[in-house]
Amino acid sequence: MAVGGKLSRMQTGKKTGRPPTLSTTDIVEAALAGDLSELTMPSVAKRLGVSHSALYRYFADREALLRACSDHVVRQTVWPDTNRPWREFLKDFCDVLWSSFERYPGLAQVGLAVPGTPPAIIEIVEKLVGSLTAQGFTPHDAILAVDFISEVTMTQFAMMAAMDKTVSSADSRSARQAYQESWNASESLIEGIGDESTWHGRGWLDEKITIMLDGLEKRVIG
């Protein structure tokens, strides 16, 4: 009888513990508050004041959370108007990408390293490709153009972001100093490398994009 009474109380008593208050948006926003390249589930959980095991009810692993972060950023970003000449909106596409990488540290590295493409990115690419094909691009060249700009911008941002980091525990130089010393040692290359601006800001990004756009223009017109 005692066992039965105890069981009865267990069945009819109120549930204890804090009710779930998290949402996927809460978790994504907490993740975006830090450097995505250094994200761990425990660090995100700490920002939210929950145990990291609670996050796995919403995201299977770190990579799934990072993809959700990328998707969220893309959906919150104002992308270029594609109802303009293709060269104009592709240059703006590059600029918007760069700005988003500046706003969310680690986002460029996530784009390069985390497998899978979030749905929001597919939607943006479809829009860009649709406008390019309407302006004379083949479907393949249209996708190639968008992919090239995305990849070059991500790679360039990740590289420039790492310029201030120390080479190693045994080498106190910054990555920038190490690169400069290596390349400046070549008398035949130093003139082509250019001035100090090469190693700061966007580096050669704009020149790389211009060369690509010039080549595309000849290809489309031809």
Image (cartoon, rainbow, N blue to C red):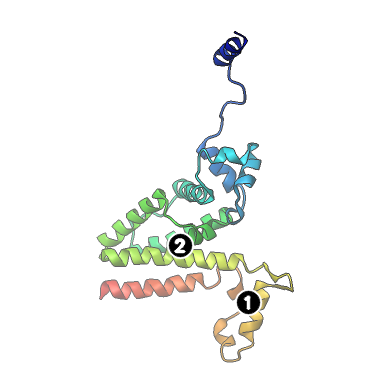
Report x, y in % for residue 31.
58, 46
Residue that carries the numbered disc 1 in the rendered image: 196
As drawn, 208 above or below 50: below
**Res 54 → quadrant:** top right
For badge 2, the amino acid type reads Cys
Report x, y in % for residue 82.
35, 56
Query: For the point 43% across and 72% down, which residue is it?
Result: 210
How many circles with numbers are drawn on the protein?
A: 2
Among the two numbered marks 1 and 2 on one chain, the one whose residue lies closer to the N terminus: 2
Q: Give the distance between the C-alpha atoms of the residues marked 1 and 2, in whole angstroms.
A: 23 Å
As drawn, 192 above or below 126: below
Locate the N terminus by quadrant. top right
Q: State the residue in front, 110 or 163.
A: 110
Query: For the point 61% across and 89% down, which residue is it?
Result: 186
Report x, y in % for residue 91.
42, 64
Q: State the residue in front, 4 or 135.
A: 4
**Res 175 → quadrant:** bottom right
Given the current orientation, which residue lies at the most extreme front position?
Answer: 1
Residue that carries the numbered disc 2 in the rendered image: 94
